[in-house]
Amino acid sequence: MTQIDILQRLAATLAQRKQAAPTASYVSGLYAKGTDAICKKVAEEAAETIMAAKDGGGEHLVYEVADLWFHSMILLTHFGLSPEDVLRELERREGVSGIEEKKARQA
C-alpha cells in the first residue's frame, strides 16, 4: 500500500459522501451547502495553516495542512476532479522553472 492509496481511498469516500443524504455525514452536509460553503471552509483551513506556520510549525502545522488537504479534496470532488488531476498538473510542472511556468500562464 502506498501513500497515494490513502488519497485514492479518501477520494472514493468523498465521492460516496457526495451522493449521500445531507444528514448522513459532515462531508455530505457540506456538499449540500454548495460551492460557497466549501470554499469558505477551504479558506478557513488555509488561514489556520498560515497561523500554525507563524506559530512555529511542527505537529500543529501538519494537522492544519491535513485539514486543508482534506477540504481541498472535498472542493475537487465537488467539481468532479480528483487527486490524480492535481498530481498530473504537478508532474507537468516538474522541472519547469516557476518563472517560466508563470510566464506561460500569462501568455
Image (cartoon, rainbow, N blue to C red):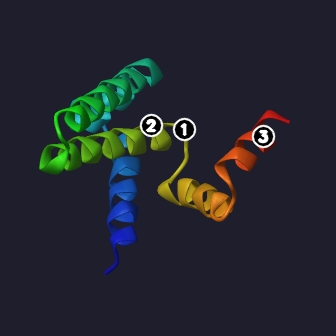
- Give residue 96's quadrant in the image: bottom right
Mark 3 and mark 1: span between their CA atoms? 27 Å
Q: Mark 3 = which residue?
A: 103
Q: Mark 2 = which residue?
A: 75
Q: Residues within 10 Å of mark 1 (few under 14, many from 20)?
A: few
Tell me the residue at 65%/49% (across/down): 98
Of residues 7 and 95, the one drawn nearer to the viewer in this rendering: 95
In x, y percent, where is residue 105? Answer: 76, 39
Mark 2 and mark 1: span between their CA atoms? 7 Å
Amino acid carrying mark 2 in the image: Leu
Amino acid carrying mark 3 in the image: Lys
- Give residue 4's quadrant in the image: bottom left
Q: Mark 1 = which residue?
A: 79
Q: Residues within 10 Å of mark 3 (few under 14, many from 20)?
A: few
Q: Of marks 3 and 2, which one's residue comes earlier in the chain? A: 2
Position of the C terminus by quadrant = top right
Q: Residues within 10 Å of mark 2 (few under 14, many from 20)?
A: many
